[in-house]
């Protein structure tokens, strides 16, 4: 039996947390032979901490053989202590009448503190995956506080967007989902993201030769993927939770599986024309567990370049809103 790894999860009593924790504890994220200790972090409010107790009771009642311990806390220094993975799901939601800049600043404070504490107390091999929105910029903010952990340790989730895009292409082509490969998400986790359909393949053929309706690819396809979160809120009365938890499971599982090819938001280093100071969705290949290389060399046509320029601009704007905080 391997020794347990420590997985810290913020926002553990939220709706994504509720779907996510059983997946971690059952082995879906780290494999069926990897025991885990869950370190659950919630906001310091009675209601949240009470709800967290209920979640922990349910985890106990699942009798997961891989679950070797549960820590519950509102203190990040306790929650992130020796954590091998830090899954940053908790964030402040946008309230009525709240400007995007205010949301960025409010969440910025949370991610500054969490970035500092993770850098101080997490395990030497710690990896961070950010889900709480605005995910790319929150990730950049957390990474900006780290002196010990290098920026490549900090990734943000665009896998839900990738999964959404994959399904839409499969439906349009009338093929099994598994026939769709190499659909990658570039840029921000927001409606400006760009799912690069021109590099995708369907049953081994270029997606654009299987789906020849380029107006659909450039219009309804991008719109459906980009606005899927809002469509789910309109239908369900609550934001995506099960699919987000599933996507985070995929994000981490791919990152611990050498050879996996997938989309994550990483520090850009200028690839594909992104500002080197923003965290942008990119295609990556996992090298060793927890490490990756950005796949470069995909050639972008003018349409793709204009979409990437727009999502890059949004990321630059978000960075400028919080510039004071990350100095
Ligand atoms: P919920 O509001 O259900 O849960 C969030 C939880 O975080 C709450 O229990 C809250 O008490 C806790 N929290 C707030 N501040 C905290 C802090 N400083 N430390 C620890 N816990 C804290 O939201 P949920 O639906 O679970 O969504 C969580 C986040 O994921 C939101 O920011 C949401 O916008 C974002 N999403 C990101 C997605 C992505 O693809 N990157 C997709 C799904 C989701 O919308």
Image: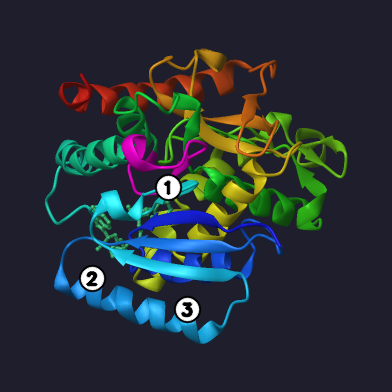
- Which label belongs to residue 48? 2
Identify the element where label 2 is drawn: helix
For the question of whether residue 200 can be seen, the reply is: yes
User: On the image, which quarter does residue 279 sit in?
Assistant: top left
The Cα–Cα distance between marks 3 and 1, rounded to whole angstroms, is 22 Å
Ligand 1, what quadrant?
A: bottom left
User: In what quadrant of the picture does the N terminus appear?
Assistant: bottom right
User: Residue shown at 86%/36% (left/top)?
Assistant: 205
Residue 68: x and y, percent?
A: 53, 69
Q: Within the image, what quadrant is residue 58 found in?
A: bottom left
Who comes first in sequence, dot 3 or dot 2?
2
Q: Taking 98 as reference, is 124 above or below it?
A: above
The tally of labels here is 3
Classify the position of the C terminus by image quarter. top left
Nearer to me, 24 or 132: 24
Whether disc 2's CB lies below 8 Å from ligand 1 is answered yes
Q: Identify which residue is drawn at 58% across, 48% down.
A: 252
Q: Position of residue 46 (x, y in %)?
A: 15, 73
Q: Which of marks 3 and 1 is in front?
A: 1
Left/right placement of residue 162 relative to residue 257 reads left
Magenta span of residues: 118-135
The residue lying at 69 percent from left, 19 percent from top is: 298
**Does the magenta segment cover residue 214?**
no
- Identify the residue under disc 3: 59
Circles 3 and 2: CB atoms closer than 8 Å: no
Tell me which numbered mark, 3 or 1, is placed earlier along the sequence: 3
Image position of 211 (left or right of 283) = right
Mark drawn on residue 302 = none
Residue 121 falls left or right of residue 309: left
Q: How crowded is mark 2: few (under 14 residues within 10 Å), some or many (20 or more)?
A: some
Identity of the residue drawn at 41% across and 22% down: 312
The residue pinned by badge 1 equals: 82
């Amino acid at each position: 039996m391997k020794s347990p790894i420590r997985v810290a999860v913020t926002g553990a009593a939220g709706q994504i947390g509720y779907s996510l924790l059983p997946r971690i504890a059952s082995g879906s994220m780290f494999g069926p032979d990897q025991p885990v200790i869950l370190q659950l972090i919630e906001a310091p409010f009675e209601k949240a901490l009470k709800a967290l107790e209920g979640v922990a009771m349910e985890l106990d009642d699942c009798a997961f053989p891989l679950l070797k311990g549960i820590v519950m806390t509102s203190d990040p220094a306790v929650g992130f202590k020796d954590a091998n993975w830090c899954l940053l799901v908790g964030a402040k939601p946008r309230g009525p009448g709240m400007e995007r800049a205010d949301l960025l600043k409010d969440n910025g404070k949370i991610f500054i503190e969490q970035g500092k504490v993770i850098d101080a107390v997490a395990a030497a091999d710690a990896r961070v995956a950010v889900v709480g929105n605005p995910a790319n910029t929150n990730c950049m903010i957390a990474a900006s506080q780290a002196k010990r952990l290098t920026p490549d340790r900090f990734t943000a989730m665009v896998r839900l967007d990738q999964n959404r895009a994959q399904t839409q292409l499969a439906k349009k082509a009338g093929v099994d989902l598994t026939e769709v490969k190499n659909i990658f998400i570039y840029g921000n986790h927001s409606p400006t993201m760009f799912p690069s359909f021109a590099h995708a393949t369907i049953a081994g053929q270029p997606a654009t030769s299987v789906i020849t309706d380029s107006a659909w690819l450039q219009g309804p396809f991008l719109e459906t993927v980009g606005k899927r979160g809002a469509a789910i809120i309109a239908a369900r009365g609550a934001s995506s939770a099960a699919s987000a938890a599933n996507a985070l499971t995929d994000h981490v599982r791919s990152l611990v599986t050498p050879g996996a090819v997938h989309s994550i938001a990483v520090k850009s280093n200028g690839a594909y024309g992104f500002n080197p100071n923003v965290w942008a969705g990119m295609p990556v290949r996992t090298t060793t567990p927890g490490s990756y290389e950005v796949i470069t060399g995909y050639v972008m046509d003018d349409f793709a370049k204009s979409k990437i320029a727009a999502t890059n601009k949004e990321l630059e704007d978000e960075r400028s809103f919080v510039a004071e905080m990350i100095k």
